[in-house]
């Protein structure tokens, strides 16, 4: 058996089985008197959960491809939900690109939400139909040579990646075409379910990649995107990925701590009486940041079991109206409970200033 390397994570795949008599060349089944079939060698990657078969179709096959040009009600419902979810996640909605746009169905769903819509489609017949609907269509495969005058706030790839020998390459190129904070949405058949439930009727030579939740996530992470979610749709049998383009942080951990410390010092007048609130895991980090710079008299915490204990010699105190009234400033060490602590201080009639750190 030949050595097959996973096209997603680069690890060695394991041979699963040879499935005999799978549909081959689906575009040829109409108006013929016979079925074109082919045996499929199936390989699985136990590192990322991806499954793949060798390529049996040429690139030219997709230049007149029309499978998927009709959407049934279940597909339309799922994709309307996708667009609604996508729009809710976006900070900007100017430019939208659909890679493998077919006859333009997805662009039609997106057009009320974006000012500029573009599609790329290798099938000449489908590209013409999409262009006749008024969209900016390029009849070609999506590749580095395509030039756009700007990036995109959202890019969709709907039932595209399962056809490609190297899906990661297209995914990475799409990720590079996103604007900062832009979102890439991907839909593929649920290869994880196809494999686990042995859905033999979903195997064909048109689909050579069978994605899992893990392999979709791996592909997004390797492309430098931040995963929002990967989820399954049971009807129809699909996986969806939403991923966002984020820039690398421009500051170090040390820079962030220093700027936080400087902010706090600038907000606390000389002679102020200062306490903190929150004797949890984060308190040690904040105390280390402020050591030698700011005197903190006590740390308030609502956990009765901590009352009377101390951290680095600073006593932990149960907050009462009398206790909080002695302070001008309370520094919040428990960032995830800001709303709750703010309400508690209000109920205790705290008249001073609450300062939050950490964000």
Image: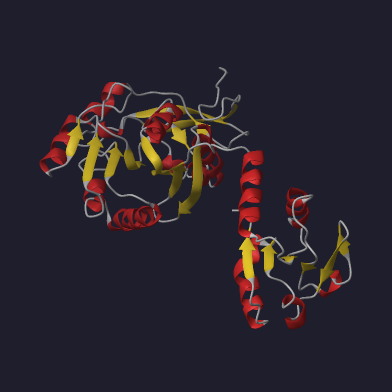
Occupied quadrant, residue 338: bottom right
Measuring from the top left, give residue 223's x and y in whole percent.
48, 32
Where residue 350 appears, as percent x and y from the top left, is 66, 78
Residue extending farthest front: 270
> Is residue 72 rendered to the left or right of residue 282?
left
Residue closest to the eye, 177 or 6:
177
Viewer-proximal residue among 97 and 206: 97
Q: Is residue 203 left or right of residue 134?
A: right
**Residue at (59% x, 70% y) in the render:** 339
- Dividing the image into 4 quarters, which one contains the N terminus? top right
Residue 244 image-quadrant placement: top left
47 left or right of 29 in image: right
- Report the colour scheme: secondary structure
| Residue 124 seen from this side | yes
Look at 30% across and 34% down and name the residue there.
26
Pinpoint residue 355: horizontal percent, then vertical percent.
Answer: 63, 63
């Amino acid at each position: 058996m030949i050595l097959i390397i996973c096209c997603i994570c680069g690890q060695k795949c394991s041979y699963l089985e040879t499935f005999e008599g799978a549909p081959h060349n689906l575009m040829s089944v109409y108006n013929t008197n016979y079925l074109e079939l082919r045996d499929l060698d199936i390989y699985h990657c136990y590192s990322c959960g991806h499954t793949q078969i060798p390529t049996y179709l040429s690139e030219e096959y997709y230049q007149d491809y029309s499978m998927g040009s009709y959407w049934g009600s279940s597909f339309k419902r799922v994709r309307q939900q996708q667009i609604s979810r996508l729009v809710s996640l976006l900070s900007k909605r100017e430019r939208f690109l659909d890679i493998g746009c077919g006859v333009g169905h997805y662009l039609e769903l997106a057009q009320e939400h974006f000012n500029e819509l573009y599609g790329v489609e290798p099938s000449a017949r489908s590209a013409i139909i999409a262009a006749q609907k008024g969209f900016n269509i390029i009849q070609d495969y999506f590749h580095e040579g395509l030039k756009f005058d700007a990036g995109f706030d959202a890019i969709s790839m709907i039932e595209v990646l399962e056809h490609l020998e190297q899906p990661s390459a297209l995914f990475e190129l799409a990720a590079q075409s996103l604007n900062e904070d832009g979102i890439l949405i991907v839909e593929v058949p649920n290869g994880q379910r196809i494999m686990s439930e042995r859905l033999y009727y979903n195997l064909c030579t048109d689909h050579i990649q069978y994605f899992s939740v893990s392999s979709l996530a791996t592909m997004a992470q390797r492309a430098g995107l931040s995963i929002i979610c990967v989820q399954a749709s049971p009807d129809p049998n699909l996986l969806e990925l939403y991923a966002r383009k984020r820039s690398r942080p421009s500051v170090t951990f040390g820079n962030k701590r220093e700027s936080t410390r400087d902010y706090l010092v600038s907000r606390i007048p000389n002679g102020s009486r200062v306490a903190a609130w929150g004797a949890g895991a984060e308190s040690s980090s904040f105390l280390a940041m402020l050591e030698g710079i700011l005197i903190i008299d006590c740390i308030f915490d609502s956990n009765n079991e901590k009352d009377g204990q101390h951290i680095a010699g600073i006593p932990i105190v149960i907050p009462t109206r009398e206790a909080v009234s002695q302070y001008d400033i309370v520094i919040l060490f428990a960032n995830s409970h800001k709303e709750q602590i703010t309400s508690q201080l209000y109920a205790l009639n705290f008249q001073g200033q609450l300062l939050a750190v950490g964000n």
